Amino acid sequence: MTPPHPETGRFAEAFTQMGEALDAWLAKERVDPLRSPTDWKTQLTGPLPRDGIGADATLREYVDLVLPHGPHLTSEASWGWITTGPATVPTAVAAASMIAAPQRQTQTAFNLLEEQALDWLVELCGLPSGMKGVFSSGGSTANLVALGAARQWALEQRGVDSASDGLGGLELAVYTSTQAHHTVQRSAGVLGMGRSQVRTVPTDAQLRLDADALDAVMTADVARGVVPVAVVAAAGTTNTGAVDPLRRCGEIAKKHGAWFHVDGAYGLPGILDERVAPLYDGLELADSAITDPHKWLNAPTGIAATFVRDRSILYRAFTQEAADYLEGAFTPDDVQVSLDSMGIPYFDFGVELSSPVRGVLVWSILRELGADGVRARIVQDNDFARHVAQRAREHSRLELLLDPVLSICVFRYVPADDVSEVAVDAANREILRRLARETRFVVSSTIVHGQFALRPCFINPRTSIADVDAFVDTVIALGDGLDTAP
Ligand SMILES: Cc1ncc(COP(=O)(O)O)c(C=O)c1O
């Protein structure tokens, strides 16, 4: 039998090779994978390898064939969806930590920083002091964990332990706006409440949840005996960055005996910009909140945090319960070495047992930039959105569809004064396609009041104002060049 490949242990060499490749790739102009001269699909596709090619050849293949044919969403002109451009320090820290700390448990620096980073996020984002959290992989899981806590709490009030016994035959409902991220519906489905039990309340002209409508829907449900589990308000919607009226949402939730959850996956750090901070009034009413450092804080993808007032509710909702392979292994009364204690048992507060360490990423971001450095980036990103808005106001062929609240700007090109709505939509779809096909700018789109909009979301630390101006110039040039004859 052939002996196995020995583990090389040559991290310095491997990381240097990767680092150099990444720097070169970032400096290069974007070439779309589907237009690459390299036939990477054929070269990467094949049967299960029987014999390995070894460490050096594998890393070389990654650098030559995989890296150059990725999505290039880290470049300075990438503002699609809510996709971060991961910053250097937390990304390097993440890579090193995967090796140094493949688990977050036991009493080590990583377990300590997991907690400190959660506490720092509470303070940074102006959450009620004393809130405690747990990290997970992204906003989807963070919302699931928060709504799991809400379900546990709501049914405990009615004598049912939902983690153990299910829903007790009760009809449950969750309340949010039509603009909410659909992970709210998915969470309701996974938690057994049912996607169709998410009531989506209409929004006002600025696409913020209509609080009066919320109150009316909840009043009607409660009168029918439905258990109102949670109100979910957005601190920064995905579509346009709208911040729901948090105070009114919180008050209405409490009036009807429901949990109040704030989805700040994207927008919670927006509170750092004092121009918009007043919009977050009422955040102190939250029973739970989430934010994703892999969005506006520029951590590499795979990190979100859920916060609650009392983490014992997470324990009751999510504990993984005793297991033979853990029993007797720890001596919490006599901790002498790190392995004597699990440290804070995060695996009991969410849906993951094994998990990468994540607090250390937030720690590295805040050590590098400080709260004021993060604030400066957020203010700059909000400025970028306002700059696009201003240019749209000033240009006769551009139309601003909503004043930006945070770092998203929704606008469109209007080919001519007398052109139909259908033709304007078609023109903007074509501009979006051509941006992707012919330029370095990656933006996405949305629908605002029935109108198709271009939608840059500025959360990329590599972006400059020159990039933003060049983008607007390009939209105008593409629009002017369209054949819009009826
Ligand atoms: C408001 C909001 N909530 C939840 C999510 C889901 O987050 P993730 O993609 O990290 O799972 C998103 C994603 O954009 C979001 O914008």
Image (cartoon, rainbow, N blue to C red):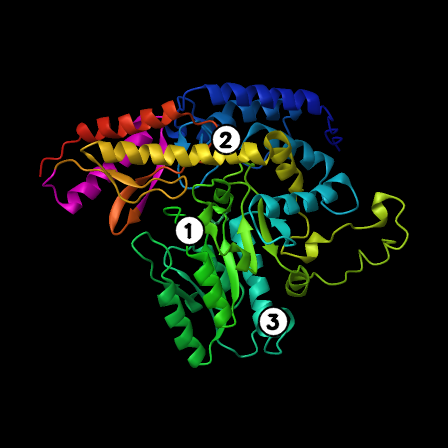
The image shows residue 381 at horizontal and vertical percentages of 43, 34
Residue 420 found in image quarter: top left
**Residue at 38 percent of width and 63 percent of height:** 211
Q: Residue shown at 42%/72% (left/top)?
A: 218
Tag nearer the camera, 3 or 2:
3
Q: Give the range drawn in magenta.
A: 417-446
Q: Is residue 85 visible?
A: no
Dot 3 lies on which element?
Answer: helix
First in sequence: mark 3 vs mark 2: 2
Horizontally, residue 60 falls left or right of residue 28, namely right
Q: Circle 1 sits on which residue?
A: 243
Q: Does the magenta stretch include residue 159?
A: no
The kind of residue on which mark 3 rests is Ser
Q: Which mark is residue 162?
A: 3
Query: Of residues 318 and 71, which is closer to you in this image?
Result: 318
Q: Name the residue under label 2.
A: 44
